[in-house]
Amino acid sequence: MALANDYNSVMSRKGEIMKKSVGIDYSSFESGSIAFDYEKMMRETGYTLEEMQKIQHSVHVGNTPIIELRNITALARKCAKPGYGARIFIKDEACNPSGSFKARRAANSVYHAKRLGFKGVVTATSGNYGAAVASQAAMAGLKCIVVQECYDSKGVGQPEIIEKARKCEALGAEVVQLSVGPELFYKFLLLLEETGYFNASLYTPFGIAGVETLGYELSMQFREKFGKDPDVVVCTNAGGGNLTGTARGLIKAGAATKIVGASVDLSGLHMAADSQFNKKSFTTGHTGFGMPFSTWPDRSDVPRSAARPLRYMDRYVTITQGDVFYMTEALASLEGLEKGPAGNTSLAAAFALAQELPEDQMIVVQETEYTGAGKHVQPQLTFARSNGIEVYFGDPKDEVPGKNIVLPSHPSLIKATDQDLDHMRRSLIRTAVNTYKVTPTEEDIAFLAEETKTDVAFVKEVLATL
Amino acid sequence: MVKKGTWVLIHRNILEPAERAPQVPDDTKKVPLEMWIKGYLQNDAEPGAEVEVITRTGRKETGTLLEAEPYYKHDYGKFVPELQVISEQVREIAFGGDE
C-alpha cells in the first residue's frame, strides 16, 4: 500500500526515514533525558583525524594554502591606534575541488555512504555544501540529489543560490528547487524515502569531523611557518559546523587559539517569510541561521546535531552586509584575490578584530569560497537594488537588514558587534528544559555546562530563574 | 511542440496553501510550496501541458512543462559605481600618501 504523502504523515515517519538514511541509531547515545553522549557519538560514528586526512587526501580535499593579507593588514593598521593591527591571514579553502571548505564535510559523508553501500546521496542545502556533495558524489560514482530553497512566490530567485544550482548540475547532480518555506524538509524526507539514498546531512558526526582536519592543518601550518599557533581564528557561523569542526581540530592539535564566530547581521528578517526572502543579500553565514543553530543545535535535519558551536565559541560577533561587501572588494583590490562574499564574513570581522590586537599577534580567517556569476558583490548589489534595497555610503551602524545596505564610507567604520554569549547560553538551557520537559538531573546539568562552555554553577543559576 | 526525450524544466505545487506546515509565517501560508525540476520529457507536449519527466537520478516527476532546454541566465549584474569608489579608496589609504 502506498504511504500517505501529506505533510503530517510524512513528518510522522521522520524518525524511521532518518535512521535508514544516515545509518546511525542516535538512541544509543541518549540518556533518556536532556543529556546525550556527544563525544561517544563523535568517536563511534565519526572517523579518526588520521582516517579523515587519508580520505580527504584521496579525493583532493584539504591542504589548502595559508595566505598572509599584507595589504589588508596595512589598511587595518591605518585604522587602528599605534602599535595595533594584528597580522591577518586567510586559509584559502576555495582551492578545494568544489570551491569551499564544505568539500571536507562532503568527502567524509560521501565516503561513508559508499562504504555502507548506498547508491546515491541526498542533501538539503542552498549553500556551497550542495556543490561539495555533488563533486564528491561525482568522484565516488554515486548519484546525487540537492534540494534547494531558491525562489519566492513570484518565481524570483536569489542569484547566489541560482549559481549554486548551476554548479551542482554541472557536477552531475539532480537539483530540486523549491519556493520559500521550512517544508523543504518534507520534500527532502520524501526523496530519501523514494530513493533509499544516504542522507548527506550537514550535521552528522562524519560531516562535522570532516572539518576537524581544517583546524588541525591550520595549527600545523602556523607551527611550521611561524613556530606558533595563531592567536585568534575567526569562523563564519551559520549552522555551526564550520566553527565546531575547526575548533575541535585545533584542540586535537593542542592549540590554545581563541575561537571567534562571525555572522552577517540579518536581524529582523524572518527566514521563512516569502515576502522577505529576496530582501536579504546573504543566503548563508548570517544570524538567521547562526543564532537559532547556536542556541539550539538540535533543530537540524538529524536527531542530534554534531555541530554544537556554543561548546567552542570564545566570542560571537556580527558584521553588516555592507561591511562584508566592502571587504570583498578590498580583498580583490588590495590582495588580487577575488572570492565569494559570504565566505568573507569572517574576513570583515577579522579586519575589525585585528585592530584590537597588537601588531605581533596573528588572526586567521579560516575560509574563502569560490566566486562566479550571481555569487559576487556586483550581481548581489544589483539584485538588492532591484528589490528596493537602498545601497549607499555611510556608517554601517545605520544599516537595517531588508531596508538598506550601508557601505562604510571609510574602512575605520567597519566594526564587529559583540553578541551576548551568556544570553545565548541561557537561551540554550531554557530551550533544553522546555523541549525535554524534565527536571534536569546531575548528568543533565554537567551536560549543559559542556554545551554552553560554562560550569555547573552557571547552569544551576540559570535553572533557578526558570 | 517539444519532442519526447528533450531536456526540460517543469513546475508543480507540492503543497497547496491549506496544506502548509503550521509554523510558517502568514505571508508564506498564503502561497503554495512550489517545485521546479528538470528531466527528460516522456511524451511530445506543448509548453503549459501536464507532463512526465525522468530526472538525472532516474526518478519520475510530473508537472507543467515550462521550458525546453533550459539554461542559466544569472550574470555579473549591472555596473555598481560604489565598488569602484571602494577600490580607489582602499588603494589610496593603503598605498597612497605624500611620498
Image: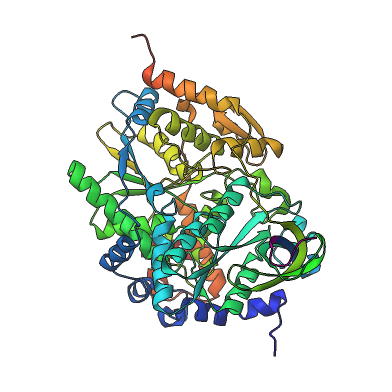
| Main SS, magenta residues | loop
The one of A439 and B49 positioned closer to us in this rendering: B49
Q: In this picture, is A311 found above or below A328? A: below
Percent position (x, y) of residue A24? 44, 79
Magenta residue span: B1-8
Report the residue that reaches farthest toward the bottom: A1
Percent from the top left, x then y, of residue B87? 48, 25
Q: What's the colour scheme?
A: rainbow
Residue nearer the viewer, A60 or A424 = A60
Decide: is A88 above or below A299.
above
Q: Position of residue B61 (x, y in %)?
A: 69, 71
Q: Quadrant of the N terminus of chain A?
A: bottom right
In this orientation, which residue lies closer to the viewer: A25 or A314? A25
Q: Quadrant of the C terminus of chain A?
A: bottom right
Number of dots carrying numbers: 0
Magenta stretch holds residue B6: yes
**Residue B44 at least partly seen:** yes
Q: Residue at the location (70% across, 61% down)? A: B8
| Residue in the image at 70% along x and 78% along y | A5
Q: Residue furthest top?
A: B98
Left or right placement of residue A443 versus residue A146 in this view: left
Among the 4 quarters of the image, the one containing residue A449: bottom left
Residue A145 is covered by the magenta coloring: no
Q: Answer left or right for A426 relative to B43.
A: left
The x, y position of residue A100, in whole percent, is: 43, 51
Q: Residue at x 28, y 39 (%)?
A: A362
Q: Residue at x 57, y 75 (%)?
A: A192
In this rendering, is residue A204 above or below A70?
A: below
